[in-house]
Image (cartoon, helix red, strand yellow):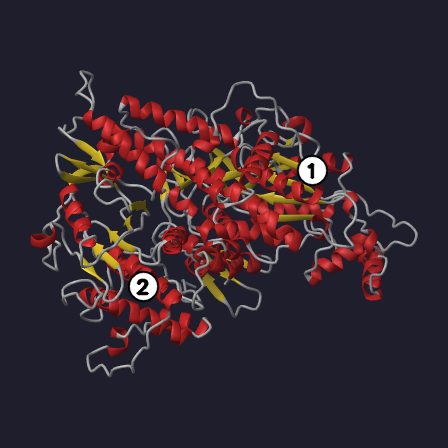
Amino acid sequence: MGTTASTAQQTVSASAPFEGLQDGGSMDGRHSLSVHSFQTTGLHNSKAKSIIPNKVAPVVITYNCKEEFQIHDELLKAHYTLGRLSDATPEHYLIQGRCFLVRDVTEKTDVLGTLQSCGAPNFRQVRGGLAVFGMGQPSLSGFRQVLQKLQKDGHRECVIFCVREEPVLFLRAAEDFVSYTPRDKQNLHENLQGLGPGVPAERLELAIRKEIHDFAQLSENKYYVYHNTEDLRGEPHAVAIRGEDDVHVTEEVFKRPLFLQPSYRYWPGLRGVPSVLGVGARWACSPGAASVSPSAGWAESAMPVSPPGMVDIWGVGCVAYLMGCSLSPGRYHRLPLPEQGAPLEAQFDAFVGVLRETPSLLLLQDAHGPPPALLFSCQTGVGRASLGMVLGTLLLFRRGGAALRPEAAPVKTKPLSMEQLEVVQNFLHTVPEGRRMVEEVDRAIAACAELHDLKEVVLGNQRELEGSRAQGSSSQHGVQQRALQSLERYFYLILFNYYLHEQYPLAFALSFSRWLCVHPELYRLPVTLSSVGPVAPRDLIALGSLGADDLVSPDALSTVREMDVANFRRVPRLPIYGTAQPSAKALGSILAYLTDSKRKLQQVVWVNLREEAVLECDGRTHSLRRPGPPMAPEQLENLETQLKAHLTRPPPDAEGPRTHRFQTCLTMQEVFSQHRGACPGLTYHRIPLPDFCAPREEGFDRLLGALQAALAKDPGTGFVFSCLSGQGRTTTAMVVAVLAFWHIRGFPEVGEEELVSVPDAKFTKGEFEVVMKVVQLLPDGHRVKREVDAALDTVSETMTPMHYHLREIIICTYRQVSPGPRAVPACTAQEGADLRARWLGHPTGPSGALSPFSASWKSG
């Protein structure tokens, strides 16, 4: 008879590790050969007349003798990878070419000892009686036991959240299914992370289950798993896999007990079920319907008899299951949360989406009765489960009011104040009721702190970071990373509580991410998450770069010879000036120039726009360029004072970073104070603005506040703005001042638009796509753009073509990196985007109106 080729064309392609997990289509394609072969073999084996083996491959002949094919076992194995943990362990197939399957729940996991009594490790309830629970990963029978406990305690409705972001598979163990996770050989103690936000965990689990089934078919219906990767004696364990029913995914383990739990089979609201469902229910429970039964493992007990006037929910459930409906009062959701750091905005949105779909959690007119039980499950029931419990507790605070707020747990040791953290300080200054938000989060954390205190983790990481800095530890970067992640998680809980205060009464009209966009003052606060505590000046000098300012090289206007400072200039017909960073000598020259007999300025407001700490040491200005977020004016001036004290102190004998010592050292506040005798009308402000990007809302508010206060006192006040070079930040502030003057005194007439005959003329005129979208959005948008452009042209009128003009800088930056159709480097492209944002940020509105910019931004 010989052998014949397969009727289907068989191809094998090598794939990169986890290629199948990253794309469901490629996963299916990769395994199309093996799945087709296994299914076809099973189909024809039931009708096969004979199987004739030979040296090439077994040949299957069917009854009709018209179809003949081969099973190419060696070909199936070609694109799989074999591996082992040690030379003493057997070799077996690896999941996606690199992962071992490891049991993720051990006896050591169950700290509270609830595995036997409740069915899950570390099962617990929030202090104070709120219906919020947390637990570690249960098995299939363990989860049934958890549901029975909840029902016994009187919780008739429950919402279950699995907050695990890694794929979890459940393999048969006697009469139960226990959990395993794929782990990399290089890191067997941690779950897979960073699989990407576009890769749902459910899809990963289905792909891995298919792969395990394929491996078992090639290995005598067994697959090897590990229970203890620290001690490999007796490892690995062979688990029998005869079909895909021997491997469950997370959704099956949680949803099937919910669907079949006896006390959940009746739903009082189903008395008005349509008759077709009633017929289906009676048919499903009739003797003739015995052949139509749930799949293996679903049926737990005999069909109950429906009470009078109640439709049999088992029959309705079967019909509803076939129709894709969900009638169970128990609901399951997969809400992946990160093991470290704060959840993503999309994950907060997913949680809010569940709340929207749960009427019993909302303040609706027809909502009555107790809220459903909220149950959060992760691997151990500690970190991510505690985070979910805090979210649920904050939600029930809003639903039940003050009566449901548990008292804070007794404090055993005096904790460090969270208000010393910069990001918390900024939140308290930004939000009127910020202290209340923080206190509620602290109470919720304390109520969920039986196993994991999120607040204490933040403070513990801060203490560890301070210790590592003092000792100069080489692991300081890792400690700092953990400190930032824990602080980020704590801060986002505060933001979410503020979101609940505003959106819960509105039934979550806005998602969390959309709500953050409506609050730009909050959206930018996480940028300040760079340090968890105050840093000593010596550490700042060691981490940063204290260097002298170069005041000659950027002098595009050649004013150093006359004014002792670079790029000194004035706006025509307005008492608005700009300059680079002046020394004490240059400051005296400028003040003498402004108050001479020609200009006769009685009041001069000097605005320092630098966001870095600046000192004048031995007659020359030095600045500290440090990594990290921007600082408030008070923080900058306090830092300058600390740096001065550190630099003027005699060199200590103790070991430490060596610093330059100076004979004289003055802060900027002291430099300007020295000149108040010669110029009594001098007022100094520190309003830090970021370089190469748009000012923040509070920066606009401070600028407009300083302008408004000075002009109310004396309309003839002169204004001087300074930054390091006198270009970017100085020009931005001068344009803001010009627009403010024009709003008060009236806008000059703008002439007709000139024709521009240059390449990319529309960009030279500032007609970028994002700008034109804003123009279309704003009332009188074209007029507003013309006024801003006129202010830019006025400020740049005295400049040379080599100096700073915002519209020109935008297109020139783009041309530098885009001479042809090639990719724009990320850093320069971002710089161009930041420059456009700076231009868009210039405030303008109804003539004479100088309202706070942040308020007008939020109201828009």
- Residue lying furthest left: 561
Residue at 37%, 67% in the rendered image: 745
Q: Which residue is mark 1?
A: 402
Residue in front for this viewpoint, 706 or 78: 706
Whole-Å distance between the Cαs marked 2 and 1? Answer: 51 Å
Residue 259 percent across, percent down from the top left: 71, 49
Q: Which residue is mark 2?
A: 738
> Mark number for residue 545?
none
- Residue lying furthest front: 597
- Residue lying furthest top: 653
Residue 26 percent across, percent down from the top left: 42, 60
Please say whether residue 249 is visible from this viewpoint.
Answer: no
Residue type at mark 1 is Ala
Q: Quadrant of residue 537?
A: top left
Residue at 48%, 45% in the rendered image: 430
Residue in front for this viewpoint, 777 or 377: 777
Residue 364 percent across, percent down from the top left: 73, 54
Please say whether residue 336 is visible from this viewpoint.
Answer: yes
Q: Is residue 785 above or below residue 580?
A: below
Q: Earlier in the sequence, mark 2 or mark 1?
A: 1
**Secondary structure of the residue carrying numbered label 1:** helix
Residue 642 percent across, percent down from the top left: 28, 30
Mark 1 closeness class: few <14, some 14–19, many ≥20 residues within 10 Å: few
Position of 295 with respect to 353 (left or right) is right
Say which of marks 2 and 1 sits in front: 2
Residue type at mark 2 is Val
**Secondary structure of the residue carrying numbered label 2:** helix
Mark 2 closeness class: few <14, some 14–19, many ≥20 residues within 10 Å: many
Residue at 34%, 53% in the rendered image: 16
Residue at 45%, 68% in the rendered image: 846
